[in-house]
C-alpha cells in the first residue's frame, strides 16, 4: 500500500512540475510581449517550428482552395506540396521577422512591415489574462505530451498559439491564425 501511495505522490509531483513549468513559460512569454522586448520574445520562440507551422497552414488552405475549383490529381498535389512549400516558406519568413512577430503577439495584427501590408487581425497574446490560472488552464488544449495549444479568445477569429517543450523549457512553436487571415495570406500566393 505504501508503494502505491508513493507512486501516486511521485506522479502527482511530476504532473504539478510539468504544468507549472508550462505556466511559468507562458507567464514569461506574455510578460515579454507586454513589455515589447523583441529580444526576449525571440529567445522564447522556436522560429523554425513557427515558420513550418505557418507554411503548413498556408499550403493546406491553398490546396483546399484549389480543390474547390476542380479535383486535384495526385501528381498535382505532390508538385504543389514540394514547390508550394518553398513559396509559402518565403512568405512565412517575411512575416516572422522579430518586429512582425512582436507586433503580432502584442496587438494581433498580422503584417509584413517591409512591404507595409496588413493581412488581418487575431486576438493578441498580450490580452491573455494570466492572473487567473484557471482561465489559462481552461484555454489549454493538449496536442502531444510535449506540446499544447492556448486559445487566445473565444471567437473563431481569435486564433491560438502552440508551445513545445524544447531543451529545458517551453518555447512558442506555432501561431495558428484564424481562417480569414490565412485566406488573405493565400491570396498573396501565385495561383499558377
Image: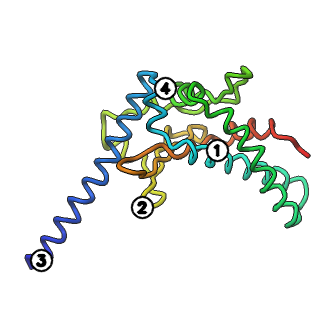
- Residue at the farthest left position: 2
Q: Tell me the number on the disc at residue 38.
A: 4
Q: Residues within 10 Å of mark 1 (few under 14, many from 20)?
A: many
In space, the residues marked 3 and 1 are separated at their CA atoms by: 47 Å
In space, the residues marked 4 and 2 are separated at their CA atoms by: 28 Å
Indicate the position of residue 19 as horizontal and vertical percent values: 31, 51
In space, the residues marked 3 and 4 are separated at their CA atoms by: 49 Å
In space, the residues marked 3 and 2 are separated at their CA atoms by: 26 Å
Q: Tell me the number on the disc at residue 145.
A: 2
Indicate the position of residue 117 as horizontal and vertical percent values: 73, 23
Answer with left or right where residue 150 lies relative to residue 21. right
In space, the residues marked 2 and 1 are separated at their CA atoms by: 21 Å
Residues at circles 3 and 2 in contact by the CB criterion of under 8 Å: no
Residues at circles 4 and 2 in contact by the CB criterion of under 8 Å: no
Residues at circles 1 and 4 in contact by the CB criterion of under 8 Å: no
Which callout, 3 or 4, points to the residue nearer the camera? 4
Total count of labels? 4
Determine the residue positioned at 72% across, 37% down.
91
Q: Of the residues under marks 2 and 1, which one precedes in the sequence? A: 1
Q: Tell me the number on the disc at residue 3.
A: 3
Residue 147: image quadrant is: bottom left
Answer with left or right where residue 2 lies relative to residue 96. left
Amino acid at each position: 500500500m505504501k508503494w502505491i501511495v508513493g507512486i501516486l505522490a511521485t506522479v502527482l509531483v511530476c504532473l504539478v512540475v510539468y504544468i507549472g513549468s508550462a505556466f511559468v513559460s507562458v507567464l514569461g512569454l506574455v510578460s515579454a510581449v507586454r513589455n515589447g522586448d523583441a529580444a526576449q520574445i525571440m529567445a522564447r520562440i522556436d522560429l523554425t517550428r513557427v515558420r513550418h507551422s505557418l507554411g503548413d497552414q498556408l499550403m493546406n488552405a491553398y490546396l483546399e482552395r484549389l480543390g474547390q475549383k476542380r479535383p486535384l490529381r495526385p501528381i498535382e498535389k505532390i508538385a504543389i506540396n514540394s514547390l508550394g512549400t518553398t513559396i509559402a516558406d518565403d512568405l512565412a519568413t517575411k512575416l516572422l521577422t522579430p518586429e512582425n512577430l512582436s507586433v503580432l503577439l502584442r496587438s494581433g495584427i498580422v503584417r509584413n512591415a517591409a512591404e507595409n501590408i496588413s493581412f488581418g487581425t487575431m486576438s493578441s497574446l498580450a490580452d491573455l489574462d494570466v492572473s487567473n490560472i484557471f482561465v489559462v488552464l481552461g484555454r489549454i488544449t493538449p496536442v502531444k505530451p510535449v506540446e499544447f495549444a492556448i486559445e487566445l479568445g473565444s471567437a473563431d477569429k481569435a486564433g491560438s498559439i502552440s508551445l513545445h517543450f524544447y531543451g529545458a523549457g517551453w518555447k512558442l512553436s506555432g501561431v495558428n491564425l484564424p481562417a480569414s487571415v490565412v485566406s488573405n495570406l493565400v491570396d498573396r500566393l501565385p495561383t499558377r
